[in-house]
């Protein structure tokens, strides 16, 4: 993993740091609550938690402007919260209720918000990559300067369609930032057991695409890399690849006992590299916030998440007639 | 305040499990994320983490207990300094709602009398011109591209080469490289990019050099294009046309000779069109480009060069779900679509000479399907033969037969015959290829069988 570069001299305002802290904490608490509701049987099927990876989306959202689009895989709750979607609507979709973003018909892996330019939530590994390039194609066609953030994991990075997409994205100079969230494990298969490529972002070079590796446990490093990538795209230079080195603390999905790695490995990441603790340290050592200030934020976040959970339990299941709607426009 | 820690569900199917081991004891302080127990499910041993900060007030279920039902309280978590006994546990959280009773299928209606829309495709007296299917398809795209900047066409060899089958001839000259886009040979990739562009507000026409190659892209056609409107609760649709030649051409062998009508017609969220005539090719393609849903538009290489009358109208479309009765008759109904219509019409002509009057229906769209037109005809003729090029098992004809069985069983005077291609990969040898395909002779023979003549 890359070393943390920004810790010593963060070039960031107190306000922005507090925002990062709040946004990352919201994702973590939301996901913990989702795990709890899953345990209670209120959330069914597959549920892939984002705990540990919070700095990736929060850092990249800080580099986005209104109009930019985002699309991701099934590990999507964090992306939705980070782009401003309502935690209530997201949680109610997880519980399969009428108040969910897809009226309960999509579930954890399939959620969308046209208003927030969030284009899913896709359950087929790698499918979001050409979709993201297509969204970028639509912006280039219309002649605006929007950029599409296309997130995928180290597992999806071995899908053929990713490279078909790289080829066309570069051929047509599409304004797309490919974000490889490398959390080291594709379900139970470590990156080293899936490829001999020393790095995933460097594969872009075969298509002429520039990129870099980023420390994904450092939200400031992610933001800085995101700004560079976005500037590249907006300048009409085509796509950019960010391989963001991150780590998921939980299993692949709720039913994954995670026997493919040691408890010590997870614990080490949690204690030494946690992205939220990092920002907390910056806030406290920089005297941008007091322990009490942070406690108050924790409380606020807890209240938001509890409200979302309550809403997701209270919202009724979709009407039976919904079975037959939204099949055709 | 004390809260109960409940036995968690740790897989999509878990109903109970074994509390294998406690990793905490009463009085221990725990933080959210700490592992407090190991729980065995039917599949694996899982670590169970605390979701709140607090002190373990009481362990309610002993380690080693088997068959602990999901949502049973297993421990009590209290605040620092609080006693587990004094604090009344918070009421157990609401359990998951009981699975809703099987969604009520729409009440089976009494078979309604079929309603047939017999309005002509164009007003009487409209001037006609002779055009090939190829020209009609090109004109349809050109007209829609003139009408809306959001419409563009992409695919292999569609621009500079003018189309592998010359369907996009002249489009690059008129609309330029921004809207007529040559892709590399990369079906999965460009189908996905097309779908993404449709999500982004454009109206792509994605040409597959043949639908055989679209199998490399079928994940995007079905999982990304057809299902998104539903999965998004109606927020986001996918207005896209996937088009290209489908079915057998001539002597191109198994991998280049397959009909996909039945495949795509299986999928809710897709519309499936398969024109026979040039007028239908034009009117249906224009309709497809305007449709807000993903449309599979199945053409046929052999039909590209055939000429038909096409109405001279500024704006000519044909609605989906409206079959066309090419020939009225009283003794038997022949239902087909696409190139199958060639055999159906030839057979009807021959049968007429023998005094058998066949009604010939062209479905034009497989999904939505104009089942009312079929039913009304079968109620009149009492006999049905379906004709298609695809494989026999799970064919379009099989579906039509089931509809007729359910809604017009009493009207049938003979078992329905589904004519299809043979149940073999397409052979290359000329004689075998001929044997594998459905022919006019087959249709004549089937009609004789159902009419007992």
Image (cartoon, coloured by chain):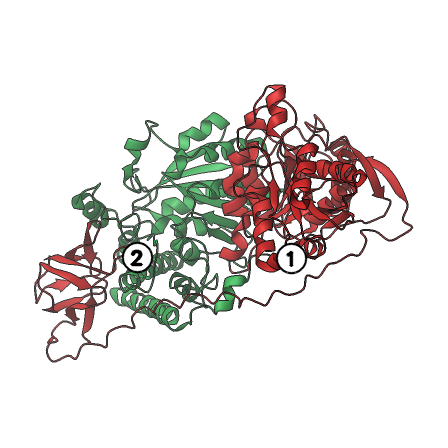
Chain colours: A green, B red
Numbered disc 1: what chain? B
Visible residue check, residue B179: no
Please state which of residues B123 and A286 is positioned toward the viewer in this rendering. Answer: B123
Q: Is B352 placed above or below B403 here? A: above
**Callout 2: few (<14), some (14-19), or many (20+) C-alpha neighbours within 10 Å?**
many
Whether residue A79 sits left or right of residue B217 in the image: it is left
Write the residue at 48% across / 45% down.
A149
Determine which of the numbered discs, if any, sits on residue A116 in the image: none
Residue A110 placement (x, y as % from top left) = 45, 54
Write down the residue under mark 2: A283
Write the residue at 21% across / 46% down.
A266
Whether callout 2 and callout 1 share a subunit is answered no
**Callout 1: few (<14), some (14-19), or many (20+) C-alpha neighbours within 10 Å?**
some
Residue positioned most to the front: B453
Write the residue at 50% across / 33% down.
A166
Write the residue at 67% across / 36% down.
B445
Numbered disc 2: what chain? A
Determine which of the numbered discs, if any, sits on residue B411 in the image: 1
Q: How many marks?
A: 2
Q: Is A167 placed above or below B396 here? A: above
Q: Quadrant of the N terminus of chain A?
A: top left
Residue positioned most to the top: B429
Q: Is B38 placed above or below B344 here? A: below
Image-quadrant location for residue B13 = bottom left
Q: In which quarter of the image is the C terminus of chain A?
A: bottom right
Q: Distance between the residues labelled 2 and 1?
A: 81 Å
Whether residue B131 sits left or right of residue B373 in the image: it is right
Residue A236 placement (x, y as % from top left) = 58, 38
């Amino acid at each position: 993993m890359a070393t943390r570069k920004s810790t010593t001299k963060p070039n960031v305002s107190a306000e922005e740091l507090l925002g990062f802290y709040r946004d990352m904490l919201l994702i973590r608490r939301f996901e913990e609550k989702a795990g709890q509701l899953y345990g209670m049987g209120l959330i069914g099927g597959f549920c892939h938690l984002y705990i540990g990876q919070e700095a990736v989306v929060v850092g990249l959202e800080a580099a986005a402007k209104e109009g930019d689009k985002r699309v991701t895989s099934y590990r999507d709750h964090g992306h939705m919260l980070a782009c401003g979607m309502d935690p209530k609507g997201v949680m109610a979709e997880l519980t399969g209720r009428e108040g969910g973003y897809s009226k309960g018909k999509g579930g954890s892996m399939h959620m969308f918000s046209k208003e927030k330019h969030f284009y899913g939530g896709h359950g087929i590994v790698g499918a979001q990559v050409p979709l993201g390039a297509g969204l970028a194609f639509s912006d280039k066609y219309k002649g605006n300067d929007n950029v599409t953030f296309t997130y995928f994991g180290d597992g999806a990075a071995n899908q053929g369609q990713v490279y078909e997409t790289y080829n066309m994205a570069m051929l047509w100079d599409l304004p797309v930032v490919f974000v490889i969230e490398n959390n080291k494990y594709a379900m139970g298969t470590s990156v080293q057991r899936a490829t001999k490529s020393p790095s995933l972002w460097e594969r872009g070079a075969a298509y002429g695409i520039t990129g870099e590796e980023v420390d994904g446990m450092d939200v400031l490093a992610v933001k800085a890399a995101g700004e560079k990538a976005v500037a590249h795209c907006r300048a009409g230079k085509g796509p950019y690849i960010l391989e963001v080195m991150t780590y998921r603390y939980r299993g692949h999905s709720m039913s994954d006992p995670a026997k493919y790695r040691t408890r010590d490995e997870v614990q080490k990441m949690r204690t030494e590299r946690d992205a939220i603790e990092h920002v907390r340290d910056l806030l406290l050592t920089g005297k941008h916030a007091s322990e009490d200030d942070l406690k108050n934020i924790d409380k606020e976040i807890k209240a938001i998440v509890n409200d979302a959970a309550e809403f997701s339990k209270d919202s009724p299941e979709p009407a039976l007639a919904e079975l037959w709607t939204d099949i055709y426009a | 305040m004390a809260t109960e820690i409940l036995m968690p569900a740790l897989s999509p199917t878990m109903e109970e499990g074994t509390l294998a081991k406690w990793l905490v004891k009463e009085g221990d302080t725990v933080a959210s994320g700490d592992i407090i127990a190991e729980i065995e499910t039917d599949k694996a041993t899982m670590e169970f983490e605390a979701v709140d900060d607090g002190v373990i007030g009481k362990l309610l279920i002993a380690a080693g207990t088997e068959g602990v039902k999901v949502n049973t309280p297993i421990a009590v978590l209290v605040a620092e300094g609080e006693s587990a006994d004094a604090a009344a546990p918070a009421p157990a959280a609401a359990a998951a709602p009981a699975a809703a009773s099987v969604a009520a299928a729409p009440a089976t209606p009494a078979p309604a009398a079929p309603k047939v829309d017999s309005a002509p495709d164009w007003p009487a007296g409209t001037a006609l011109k002779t055009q090939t299917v190829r020209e009609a398809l090109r004109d349809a795209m050109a007209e829609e591209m003139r009408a809306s900047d959001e419409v563009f066409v992409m695919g292999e060899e569609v621009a500079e080469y003018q189309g592998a089958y010359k369907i996009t001839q002249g489009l690059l000259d008129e609309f330029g490289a921004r809207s007529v886009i040559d892709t590399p040979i990369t079906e999965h990739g460009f189908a996905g990019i097309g779908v993404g562009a449709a999500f982004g507000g454009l109206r792509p026409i994605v040409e597959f050099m043949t639908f055989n190659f679209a199998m490399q892209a079928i994940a995007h056609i079905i999982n990304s294009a057809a299902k998104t409107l539903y999965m998004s609760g109606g927020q986001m649709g996918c207005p896209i046309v996937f088009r290209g030649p489908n079915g057998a051409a001539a002597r191109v062998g198994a991998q280049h000779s397959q009909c996909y009508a039945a495949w795509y017609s299986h999928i809710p969220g897709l519309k499936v069109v398969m024109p026979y005539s040039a007028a239908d090719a034009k009117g249906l393609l224009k309709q497809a480009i305007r449709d807000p849903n993903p449309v599979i538009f199945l053409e046929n290489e052999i039909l590209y060069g055939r000429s038909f009358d096409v109405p001279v109208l500024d704006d000519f479309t044909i609605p989906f779900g409206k079959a066309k009765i090419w020939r009225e008759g009283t003794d038997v109904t022949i239902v087909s679509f696409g190139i199958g219509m060639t055999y159906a019409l030839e057979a009807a002509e021959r049968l007429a000479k023998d005094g058998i009057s066949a009604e010939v229906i062209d479905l034009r769209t497989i999904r939505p399907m104009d089942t009312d037109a079929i039913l009304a005809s079968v109620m009149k003729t009492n006999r049905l033969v379906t004709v298609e090029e695809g494989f026999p098992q799970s064919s379009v004809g099989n579906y039509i037969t089931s509809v007729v069985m359910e809604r017009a069983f009493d009207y049938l005077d003979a078992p329905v015959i589904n004519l299809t291609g043979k149940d073999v990969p397409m052979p290359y040898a000329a004689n075998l290829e001929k044997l594998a395909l459905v022919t006019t002779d087959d249709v004549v023979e089937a009609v004789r069988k159902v009419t007992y003549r």
